[in-house]
Amino acid sequence: MMRALLEKTKSFGLKQFPISFWNNGNIKEHGDHMTEAEVESWADAGFTVPQTPSFDPSNEEQKAHIVKLLNWAEKYGMKLIVMDPRGHAKKGNMEEYASAVRAAAADFGKHPATFGFHVGDEPDAYMKNTFFECYRVQKEAAPDLHPYANLLPYFNWILERAGTDSWPNYLDEYVQKAKPDMISYDCYMQMTSGEEGVHDYYRNLRFYREAALRNGIPFWNTILSVGHLYYRCPNQDDIRWQFNTSIASGANGISWWFYHMLAPNANYRMSPVDELWDKTPTYYDIRRVQVGFHRHYTDLFNRVVSTRVTFHAKIYGEGLEFTPNDIILKVDSDKKTPMIIGEFADLEGNRYAMFVNNSQTDDGMFYVTFPKGSKTFSYDWYGKEFEGGAYAHTGILPDSEGNPVHSIILAPGQEAVYRIELNK
């Protein structure tokens, strides 16, 4: 399954880690803002596969604008998820649906910047089977593209709404019936007050990671960039925390809800681009995290698969408590600051570990003990691997048995990534 998952990720043709955003705009109303400079700003913020605005495919001028967006995306090294209504899941005649998808593919499918067409979002029990079938039909109609569909998050009350008896069964049914290229979902409970929301967040990450590994396809996590309802406006620590904890938990792609505000709406506020079409501090917080991630790790996380996810000091979402293994002997922290540890491997058998401060509010000093005689490698600001401590480390000292102990100081959600080479 590891090889299948990596081959699927490779088939996406993305040179960097998949990072998307939800685009709520449409060409008719917002086309004047969808300029080359706007597309360049997406790439400048580290996005690699954002969504286009929606459009009317019967309007040749609007279709031409989508082609311009694709041209600009190619220029700046991105692919786009095309919000073509002909690909949206709908009940009805599947032959007609397939014909509409083929027409969309004739318009955009050969463009090198087309990732795929958007299928839909959060199907309930009424739409579930149709949604799954539409994904399969779309993939058959345009096999070289990668349809994007987003599923519901898990909560203990949602089984009936989703039309299932358990979440693992729901996700396996989706894979079996839809034959998708990835599993995507959204969860924003981590941006509420109290720990129960964080439990929901990690419970979802665990379910989706396990389904991805079980079925050999990647999973993408949609996280929050805009305050609304009872979700707070994410600050820089929240942005970093959501991004890095997703990756440490095995996510193979990230998407943000959402990017453009368009117009004032209820209590929505502080999206990356606001209702005045100005970039907010959220844009720059996301940019700082994503560009830094690309610079440090280049395509590393397109080439590795999650092998273990554990927690130190505080366990969330019925996850696993850290226990020693052959590459990490011990983890600890001052003040019992919580940590999440993601372990990874590549097809060559190299082993990696990602240590993330799991506090949303507090800095922490963490201590990681590696085996005596092992070598640890990390990544500099220019993406070069070097032997030694990660960029956040403050020192390396031996314990009483001569095992190297790395001291690492991390801000909320900050990460330290290592490749560990054992003494052979």
Image (cartoon, helix red, strand yellow):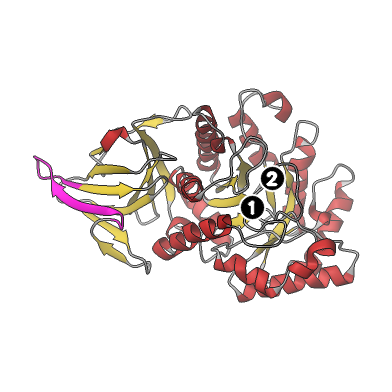
- Around disc 1, counting alpha carbons within 10 Å, would you say few (fewer than 14), some (14 to 19), or many (20 or more)? many
- Return the x and y of residue 16 as percentages of the image width and height: 51, 63
Q: Which mark is residue 296?
A: none
Residue type for callout 2: Tyr
Question: Residue 239 colored magenta?
Answer: no
Q: Nearer the viewer, residue 66 or 358?
A: 358
- Figure quadrant of residue 211: top right
Q: Nearer the viewer, residue 87 or 137?
A: 87
Residue at 80% from the left image edge and 68% from the top image edge: 107
The residue indicated by pointer 2 is 268
From this view, report whether residue 54 is shown above or below residue 382: above
The residue indicated by pointer 1 is 271
- Which SS class for mark 2? loop
User: Which segment did they paint magenta?
Assistant: 390-405
Residue type for callout 1: Ser
- Return the x and y of residue 250 as percentages of the image width and height: 47, 45
- Which SS class for mark 1? loop
Cβ–Cβ under 8 Å for marks 1 and 2: yes
